[in-house]
Image (cartoon, rainbow, N blue to C red):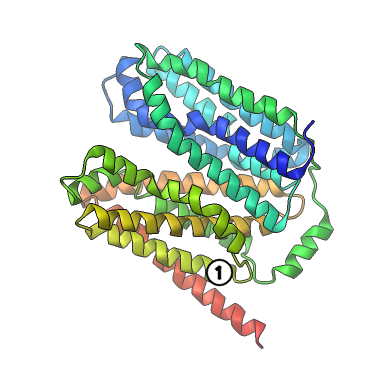
Amino acid sequence: MINGRSKAIALVALGHYLASFTALGMPPFYGLLLNRSLNNDATFLAGWLYIIPTVCLAVSSSWWGRLADKKGRKLLLIRAQLGLALSFAVAGYAENLSMFVFALVLQGFLGGSFAAANAYLAGIAEGRSLAGAITLMQGSARAALLTAPPLLGWLLSADNPVHIYRYLALLPLAAAMLTACLPAVESAGKTGSLAISRQDHPFRFSHGGLLAMQFIFTFATVISFPYFIPHALLLVPDLPEAGAGLLFGMPHLLYLLCAAPLQKRYNGNCPHLSLGIGFVLLALSLLAQQQTETAWQLSFWRVTMGVAMTYCFIGLHNAMAVAACGGQAGHRFGRFESCAKWATVAAGLTAGISVQYGSTKMPFLLGAIVLLGASVYLFGQSFKHFRLANS
């Protein structure tokens, strides 16, 4: 049994990295799997395969969260990890597209390890400590997003690459074994801690407002992802594809580098103002990426985007930590995860339509417009809170 809060948080983060490695690393290779393993040359289906587990997870996350509050958060975290292991094993034996789609449906409905891990962390940490733990969890996902594709690209040189899923199923299984070593936590929170949180954070986000900000932030960032590389190659014709791929991953790398120091310096007393500033900076970086003409300019704005994205994540994580106080952490984190997944689906569909009827610049413009509109609301709320505090 693992003793010590810091050790438990680190173990949960390691488990999430193992569980996320395949889920985040395999989607870029769906086109390859279609051609070489599933006897299907309709590579356009790769985008739909990416959406399937996302939609299923959006539907199921809230329900699994409520169950975690009732049956135990450690148990439901193990369930999520075993669910991923089962779905990956099924994918590894898929001989046609239908069976592979079934495996992705299982991945969506039986997964949800991020929300389950955050719900568990809410049982062993609170306040800034919980916010830092959520930031670490997001970092483990970013690390998987950066490290998995190159490693999997090397492994997928086999004759039948879908078989790699059979071995990748061992990763979430190992995560479940690590989680089994963690101490159990109470499913219901203490009402006293909730009262203290409300007193210490009088200007916190409402639950609905936080969900809206989560949706807007996820939508505005994800909408630029699908078409960034072709957009970068159009803006800078002499940019190599490897360079475009490096620029794509730069904001995620910046998160890993900046999250810890920014979390330590974050002031949560003015959450609306802080998030509004982050939204404006992120919107400016998206607008600038529409028109840059050199690789150096594009690199600068990708770095700016990474810092702004990290700051927004930290603002949302601190707001989530406040909202999660009490006995409904599983349900709340399930709703946060569901909201983010619906935003991802909406962003992907909107990006495709906007590029089809416009250009590769349109996703960046739409993301910036949404962020600027939300920042006006956030600054208005900040001004209202400032007047109340000084009345």
Placement of 268 over or under 226, stated as above or below: below
Q: Quadrant of residue 78?
A: top right
Do we see residue 48 in this rendering?
yes
Residue drawn 35% across the image and 65% down it: 284
Placement of 374 over or under 251, stated as above or below: below
Q: Is residue 176 left or right of residue 55?
A: right
Q: Quadrant of residue 111?
A: top right
Q: Secondary structure at mark 1?
A: helix
Placement of 72 over or under 290, stated as above or below: above
Q: Picture coordinates of residue 332 (x, y %)?
A: 65, 50
Q: How crowded is the residue under tag 1: few (<14 C-alpha within 10 Å), some, or many (20+)?
A: many
Do we see residue 58 in this rendering?
no
Amino acid type of disc 1? Answer: His
Q: Picture coordinates of residue 362 (x, y %)?
A: 27, 55
For this rendering, which residue is in front, 116 or 12? 12
Placement of 266 over or under 86, stated as above or below: below
For this rendering, which residue is in front, 177 or 91? 177
Q: Is residue 156 left or right of residue 259?
A: left
| Residue at image mark 1 | 272
Residue drawn 37% across the image and 63% down it: 283
For this rendering, which residue is in front, 127 or 98? 127
